[in-house]
Amino acid sequence: MGVEPSSAYQTKTALKATLADPEAWDLLEGLPVGVYACDKEGYIVSFNKAAVELWGRLPYIGRDKWFMDWKLFRADGTALPYEQAPMARTLQSGKAIRGEELLVQRGDGSIRYILPNPKPRFNQQGELIGAVSMLVDITVQKSDESKQAMLASIIDSSEDPIISKTLDGVITSWNNAAQRLFGYTEEEIIGKHITILIPEERHDEEQLIISKIKANERVEHFETVRKTKAGDDVKISLTVSPIRDSDNKVIGASKIIRDIGRQKEAEERMQQYAERLEILNSIGQVISAELDIQNILQKVTDATTQLCGAQFGAFFHNLVNEQGESYALFTLSGAHREAFEKFGMPRNTAVFHPTFSGEGTVRVDDITKDARYGKNAPHFGKPEGHLPVVSYLAVPVRAKSGSVIGGLFFGHPQPGMFTQEHEQLVEAVAAQAAVALDNAKLYEDIKQLNEKKDEFIGLASHELRTPVTSLKGYLQIIARNLAADEKNKTLANKALDQVGKLTTLISDLLDVTKIQTGKLPFTYADFDVVEMLADLREILQQTNPSHRLILNLPPDGLLINGDSQRIEQVVINLVTNAVKYSPKANEVIITAGVQGDKFRVSVQDFGIGIQPDQLERVFSRFYRVENLASHMSGLGIGLYICNEIVLRHNGRLWVESEYGKGSIFYFEIPVNMAE
């Protein structure tokens, strides 16, 4: 069946002599374009190497027709019958046919685009004997055209503006997105210089970009500002790439432009939101830690004025004094106090009524055009010399009970300066301020009650001291007169013990009062603290026989500078407490020694201990440890006084305790207070 490919090629060569011009065929043999000849029935009689490469195999001379094993399609992809192909029509009509593209599927399944150019061949008698055709493979060209068409479609449908320009800055292409962003049509902009889009103050950016493009460098995500046909500024991000010719030489630049206006606005809003949250948090921390009403008001006024961008702000606060008289307290920000003082408290006019009645926030772009403005005598609007207010914002401040305790007022000389966001921010601060003001008011009330209580304690203690002293003296006389009556003498001595305890309580109460007024007396001098502790232990052991007092002291004496009686008072209180709060134990350990430049004393008991959540509170005034037995009496002021004494010696007092196992109280003071 047929001949071998090598034989076929030899046959093809031998048949060259049948052509009218064999020498011309030798020239065609070396062409990169496929050329073949067929007889009038369409059988291949001759071909060159390029034709073989295009067909994909060697043909069988005289047996394969010109279409080989190809499937033919028109350029639009529809099937093309062989009899309608250019070669068939040339053989039928004897006329050359040019310029009709074919899409062929070769025997191996690959697709090629072919441009055939069949031309009829005649003998000397003018009879049609066949045809010669040149087959031009345009697959690469069609692929490039397809890519170009696809690219053009992508560029036109892109949501991002895409522009190309020469190295001289002349615009050469312009897509639909560019028109939407900048407002210029393609006809208006092509051929214009790129600086038509660049603000004058940014012309240097173009030189920078072009210099990078000429150096074959890409510019990525360059954020800048460009201007539209209407003259508006738009924030954009540029990515600029070099355009190269077939020799890889840079001949221009392509720009992809991303409109980042919304993105930047969102970033700015997020930044503002974060900053304002930080300010709100900061304000909350500051005013919650503040207990002075005037300071709270000033900080709130300053912060809210800054938050809403007001030219000036004010806080008017209604207060009622002890006599039931109402008066106005206000703070200012952005203006001098004198600017408001002469006008007094804002009256309950139609403009101010919603704020002072608690109806809600009032925000007006131009208060001078508001229907409620200028209706009241004597000013009928803004008083002469008043701060210029056009933009107006007022927010009521309500107490926890719901009652209005005042209002925040803001003004600006320009209209439309306050937004809903400003309104919400000020309302948030107003809520925080209301809580802080309630706390400050409670603090003031507690402070006044404490002052009255201290005044009463001081007066009562002083008045009690005289009759208690007399009572003690009478009991001592009675005890001596009852020397022979043991039963009644015992009762008298017990009464004396109770009077002694009462005397100690009265002394402690007087000390508390003196501490509060800063009048607790101290006398500093050098004394031997080791000797003092040794003597004190002997006395305390006699008065506390239920426990063995173990004393660990340095071997030698030690002179320190301080108030010896007050230091004794601390030790007595700590040891007495140790005995009282360890009823089931039988010893208390007292240890003293020098730690660096400090003298430290510890008193350890093995009693009921203190729960962890109460450790910090045991040194508070009138605080008693919870869950104590009913027989463990006291006012809870001993440790408070001890702490004050140690602090006045530039020392510190603290406790370590394990609940149910006992406590160790420590105090340390400098060895030399005089230094």
Image (tube, grey):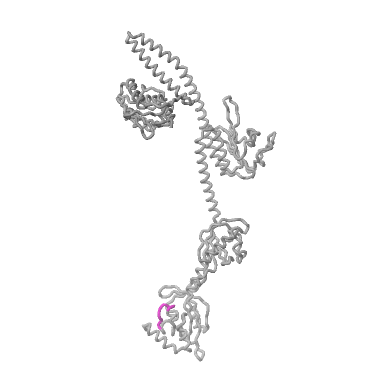
Find residue 657 and report its horizontal and vertical position in percent.
35, 31
Left or right: residue 657 versus residue 360 is left
In the rendered image of this protein, does residue 436 appear above or below residue 550? below
The foreground one among 650 and 49 is 650
Left or right: residue 642 versus residue 97 is left
Q: Is residue 374 visible?
A: no
- Which quadrant, please, contains the N terminus? bottom left
The foreground one among 407 and 151 is 407
Taking the spot 41% from the left edge, 13% from the top edge, the residue there is 471
Type of secondary structure dominating the magenta stretch: loop
Q: In the image as oriented, which residue stretches furthest toward the bottom?
A: 125
The foreground one among 265 and 633 is 633
Find residue 645 and report its horizontal and vertical position in percent.
42, 27
Residue 59 in magenta stretch = yes
Find residue 395 and report its horizontal and vertical position in percent.
58, 38
Residue 125 in magenta stretch = no
The foreground one among 647 and 188 is 647
In the rendered image of this protein, does residue 529 appear above or below residue 28? above
Left or right: residue 31 versus residue 312 is left
In the rendered image of this protein, does residue 292 appear above or below residue 513? below
Quadrant assignment, res 188: bottom right
Q: Is residue 205 visible?
A: yes
In the rendered image of this protein, does residue 405 appear above or below residue 191? above
Disc tally is 0
Find residue 551 and report its horizontal and vertical position in percent.
31, 27
- Which quadrant, please, contains the C terminus? top left
Quadrant assignment, res 567: top left
The region drawn magenta spans 53-60
